Amino acid sequence: MIKGYLVPHPPLIVPGVGKGNEIPDTRRAYEQIAAEIANVNPDTAVVISPHGVMYSDYFHIAPGESAAGDFGSFGQKQIKFSINCDAEFATLISALAQKKGLPAGPLGEKKPALDHGVMVPLYFFSRAFFFVTKLKIIRVSLSGLSAISHYRLGMCIAEAGKLLGRKFVIVASGDMSHRLSAEGPYGFAAEGSEFDKLMRDCIENGQMQKLIGTDPALCENAAECGFKSIVVMAGALDGYEINSKVLCYEGPYGVGYLTASFETAGKTESMLPALIADKNAKTDAIREAEDEYARLARLNVEHFVRTGAKLSRSKKIPQAMLNTRAGVFVSIKKDGALRGCIGTISPMQSNVYEEILENGVSAASRDPRFGPIEESELDNLIYSVDVLSPAEPIRSKAELDVKRYGVIVRCGRRSGLLLPALDGVDTVEEQISIALKKAGIASDEKYTLERFEVIRHK
């Protein structure tokens, strides 16, 4: 039997840090979990944290025989930890992941330092048993890769534990939405409570397949940090029936804290094929609903990645594309995350058709934030095309609407643009701030504003 636990990691829950705001119900749930782990008496605890070394395309598995950390960042440097690590277990996880095509390993950590996503759970574990001398720890970080990749990493953790004969528990460290109220860290968003309710219901009802299939846009808009930790833990329990139970949920300070327990029961079929089938079905449904603009962008990128050339002109091109000149942005997403986006504010080609072809190639191969798209990725990409109206100058941000208008900021030769109606951008202030950062313009510099509308094609 394998046991897993979902735990939040607010530093406020630690006495001395919280100073009277220690979130008592969550503390009691933590103490229950710590007592359960002490009763299991495991060799190793695998802790999944969203606050360790993190990459967009690589899982960091912390190396070394030991690590240390303290709560100095939260005003309590005297609360500190020094742990022993299960280096053999960690090394085998990395090797199995790489063998299965998952990019994972020890790269990136210069000094083995514990983050608060690890230290908060360890604070409570240490109160139940002498983990410093007995329990070894493995620290696993999340990545920008898909939920299915995180699930497969969890499967590698379980396989490594079995091969080594380790008795281990897996701890998914992560908070729920940070947008439950206007006073929260990221303000209020309706998706916050929607996400938290979905997580609670799926865990309480044992609907792990539904949980893992959560829309990435909902996760992003909820500003959560626990979803992928849960998915890794679920992967470690793959092939078994899972008994899951919500121990506590509360949302003080605008952040959701969910504590839950999981344990394996009888063996069953792996969930991985069903997860892949669900993902493929969702992608197929999106592609079946593509309009002519999004379809053109996709076919062009696929042709370019495979041949190195833009798509040849078809005889079935809509006249609206050929008869119109406009700025165009082509956006490409993979597993809900941006994979490339390049566009033009004003038209640079003879018509919208050519604009889509040129900017699609640029989005796939010249976006400086990402490497060129590879052929193996093509089946997982989703496209949208924004056709821009001419920009018009405005006098103040009062003339903006984050859902209706995109914004252009200018200062001398520097300029930055942000499209309207983007996931996770809910206020004009956020919109302007992001555009300024893209342009390299400081917020206290004198800049001008322009707005534009778009027709978004998906």
Image (cartoon, grey):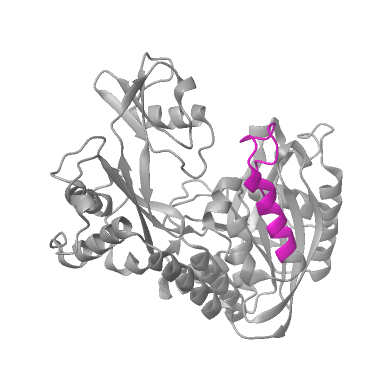
Position of residue 263 relative to residue 187, above or below, is below
Residue 204, percent across and down?
Answer: 77, 66
Q: Is residue 386 left or right of residue 61?
A: left
Picture quadrant of residue 326: top left
Query: Does 406 sit left or right of 243 as displayed?
Result: left
Q: Residue 406 sits in which quadrant?
A: top left
Q: Nearer the viewer, residue 338 or 287?
A: 287
Quick check: is 192 in the magenta stretch?
yes
Please tell me whether residue 429 is drawn above or below residue 146 in the rendered image: above
**Quadrant in the rendering for residue 158:** bottom right
Q: Position of residue 286 (x, y in %)?
A: 43, 64
Q: Position of residue 159 (x, y in %)?
A: 57, 78
Camera sees residue 138:
no
The quadrant in which the N terminus is found is: bottom right
x, y (%) of residue 399? 45, 22
Q: What residue lies at 61% left-to-right and 57% top-to-bottom?
A: 227
Residue at left offset 61%, top offset 80%? 162
418 left or right of 27 in image? left
Tell whether position 451 is magenta: no
**What stretch of residues is rendered in magenta?**
176-202
Can you say which quadrant of the picture contains the C terminus?
Answer: bottom left
Asked whether the viewer can see residue 337, the reply is yes
Please, is residue 71 above or below residue 123 in the view?
A: above
Residue drawn at (30%, 29%), measured in percent from left and top?
391
**Residue located 40% across and 72% down the image:** 101
